[in-house]
Structure formats: C-alpha cells, structure tokens
Image (tube, helix red, strand yellow):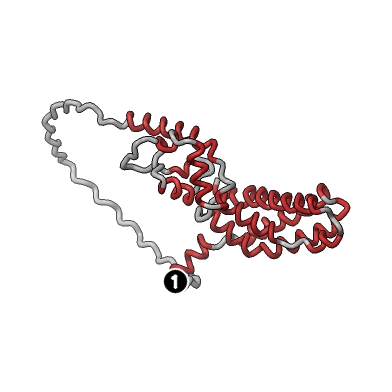
Amino acid sequence: MAKRTSTKDNLTKIKGIGPKIQGLLNAKKILTYKDLSVAKLSTLQAILDEAGPRFNLAEPKNWIAEAKALAKSSTATSSTTTKPKTRTKPKSKPKAKPKTSTKPKAKPKAKPKAKPKTKPKATTKPKTSDEASKIKVGELDLPRFRKIMKELKDNTEDLTKMTVRKYRKQAKKDADKLLRGMRRDLRRWTRLLEKGELTTEDFEFLCKSQVASAKMSALESSGLAEIRLEAYRSSIFNMIIDTIFGLALKALK
C-alpha cells in the first residue's frame, strides 16, 4: 500500500462508494485515489465483510481501475498548476495629464419622481427557519411521491402477469399490501437518498429487508411453490429499486 499523504481525496466520486464506505476505507488508511489504486481486491472485500452484511451488495472490483484513472488525472492537473515563470514587468510610462475641458458639464435632467408602488400583502411565513427548511429541502414533493407509488402499482400489475399468471389475484393482493406497508418508509428513504444522507447500497439493503420479511398470505394459502414465491419476492424488490431510481433520482441529474 502507498505511503499515506497529508491530503484526502473524495472517494465518493467512484461509483459504488458512498460516505459510509468512504469512512470504512479511511479507517484502514485508504485516503487517496492512489491509496485505493494500489490496494488489493481481497483487502477491499475484507473491509466490507468486516463492516457487516449491509455492505455485502457493494462491488469493489471496479473501484481500483476508477481510482487509477482519477489519480492519474489529479496528478496531471497538479502539474499544470505549478507556479508560472515570473515575467518582467514592462516599464510604466508616465501618465499623460488629462486635458482640461473648457466646456461646462451639462447638468443631468431631473427625473420625475416615481410613484411608490403598493406593497403586496405579505403571505404567512413559517414561524421558524427549521419549518422553512423542511418545506424547501426536508420533505419529498408529495405529488411526485404519489407518481412514484402509482408507477409501482402499475408495474406490480404487469409483474404478476409475467411471473405468476395463474395466481394473479393473490399476488396482486399481497403486493398491494406490501406497498401500503412500505409507503411511509419509502418516502423517508427516498428523501434521504435525494439529500445524499443515504447511499444507493443502503437504500437497496433496507428495501430488501422489508420485502424479505413481508408476509405473502394469499399466495402461501393458494399452494404456490416456495421457490416460485421467493422468485416473486425478488421480482418485487427489483421492480421497486428500478422504479425509485428511475423516477426519484431524475431531479438530481
């Protein structure tokens, strides 16, 4: 591993590394792109395994190549920002005296006074700055979230037709119940995801845990085979991830 430098690079520029994973790497003295570019894949995987199962979805195999490219570009930019050669200042010519004009300056015409505009009635403002920040940043736009939930519901209907056509009614009943139960958490997680306080890996981990623990009572009582039931769960999870990332994150691009 390369010697640790006094500066740190923003490792979150690399795809798949969020603030939490960056903290794990920094704790193991991987602070810069150069440190990461010379790290072994087995070392990175060991760091993720040690951090717990929530980081099992991270794939570090592409980090090293991206870190090498970023390290190379950062060294190239640093070489171009070296101090320029000192140039000899040209001798300053003596300033010529301004010619005195004999014509008197014309007085500016007085502009007519504008009538004072009537102030519009002040709208009611939030009592505190915290309330204002919740309105501007802290709350996911409700109409947009409703659009996300509608898209999830429509995609669920298409999913049941393709996967468990014979048990379509039972599957739709269980899926609708699952989405209703996840509605509040999905809105909160999506809001944190848009603000950068939750990584995509964390978001996927939380959704996968919810889907895995949800009961599929209608499908279980219908006699659907366990392996097909688990395949349907996996399909619902993938559908939720694709829909959220496709609609909720468009505003960040």
Q: Position of residue 102 (x, y in %)?
A: 15, 40
Helix, strand or loop status at disc 1: loop
Callout 1 amino acid: Thr
Residue 43: percent from the left, percent from the top?
48, 40
Left-right relation of 187 to 196: right
Depth order, front residue of 250/52: 52
Question: In front here: 52 or 140?
Answer: 52
The residue depicted at 62 percent of the width and 49 percent of the height is 245
User: What residue is shown at x 58% (from left), y 58% (from top)?
Assistant: 189
Which residue position is annotated with label 1? 128
Say if 204 sits above or below 173 in the image: above
Task: Name the side, left or right, on which 85 lies relative to 199.
Answer: left
Q: Tell me if 163 is positioned left or right of 137 in this view.
A: right
- Say left or right for 7 vs 62: left
Residue occupying the point 82% across, 47% down: 162
Give 110 or 43, whichever is nearer the viewer. 43
Which quadrant of the figure contains the N terminus?
A: top left
Rendered residue at 62%/62% (across/down) = 185
Residue 106: % across, % down: 24, 47
